Image (tube, rainbow, N blue to C red):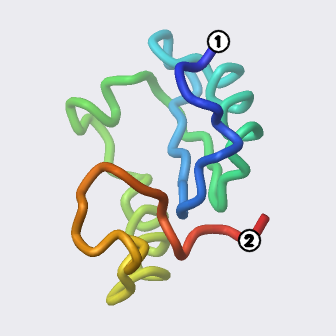
């Protein structure tokens, strides 16, 4: 069971999943993504090392495109007035 209620996450989330990942198997990644309601989900061949050790960067264009959607936008709620780590994100997905 997650330590936080995943359905309360309200910011843009992308999942880049390795098909043979034993640390976070695709079934767990899919379940978590479904709970959050992610904006992007893609499975890539390989295991966890593809991301941690950079054994393949074939996901990079998807990552870059996702990040470009939010370039120049503040995802922090302006009502927080700079209080880091104690609030919600404002420009996430619509629920």
19 or 30: which is nearer to us? 30
Q: Which mark is residue 1?
A: 1
Q: Residue at x 20, y 31 (%)?
A: 53
* Residue hosting label 2: 94
> Which is more N-terminal, label 1 or label 2?
1
Badge 2: residue crowd in 10 Å (few <14, some 14–19, many ≥20):
few
Q: Quadrant of the N terminus?
A: top right
Q: Real-space Cα distance between discs 2 and 1?
A: 25 Å
Q: Residue at x 59, y 58 (%)?
A: 10
Drawn side of residue 30 relative to residue 56, left or right: right
Q: Secondary structure at mark 2?
A: loop
| Above-or-below relation of 38 to 5 | below
Q: Which mark is residue 41?
A: none
Residue 64 position within the rendered picture, expressed as x and y whole percent measured from the top left: 38, 70
Specify the quadrant of the image occupied by residue 94. bottom right
Q: Residue at x 23, y 38 (%)?
A: 54
Residue 32 position within the rendered picture, expressed as x and y whole percent measured from the top left: 66, 31
Badge 1: residue crowd in 10 Å (few <14, some 14–19, many ≥20):
few
| Above-or-below relation of 76 to 13 | below
Q: In the displayed orientation, state which residue is furthest to the bottom.
A: 72
Mark 2–mark 1 CB contact (< 8 Å) = no
Q: Secondary structure at mark 1?
A: loop
Q: Quadrant of the C terminus?
A: bottom right
Drawn side of residue 92 relative to residue 76, left or right: right
Q: Residue at x 48, y 64 (%)?
A: 89
Drawn side of residue 81 relative to residue 58, left or right: left
Residue 45 position within the rendered picture, expressed as x and y whole percent measured from the top left: 53, 34
| Above-or-below relation of 88 to 42 | below
Disc tally is 2
């Amino acid at each position: 069971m997650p330590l936080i209620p995943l359905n309360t996450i309200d910011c843009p989330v992308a999942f880049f999943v390795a098909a043979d990942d034993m640390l976070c198997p695709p079934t767990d990644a899919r379940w978590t993504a479904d709970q959050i309601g992610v904006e992007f989900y893609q499975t890539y061949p390989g295991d966890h090392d593809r991301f941690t050790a950079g054994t393949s960067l074939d996901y990079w264009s998807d990552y870059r495109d996702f990040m470009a959607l939010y370039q120049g936008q503040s995802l922090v709620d302006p009502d927080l007035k700079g209080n880091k780590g104690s609030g919600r994100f404002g420009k996430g997905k619509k629920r």
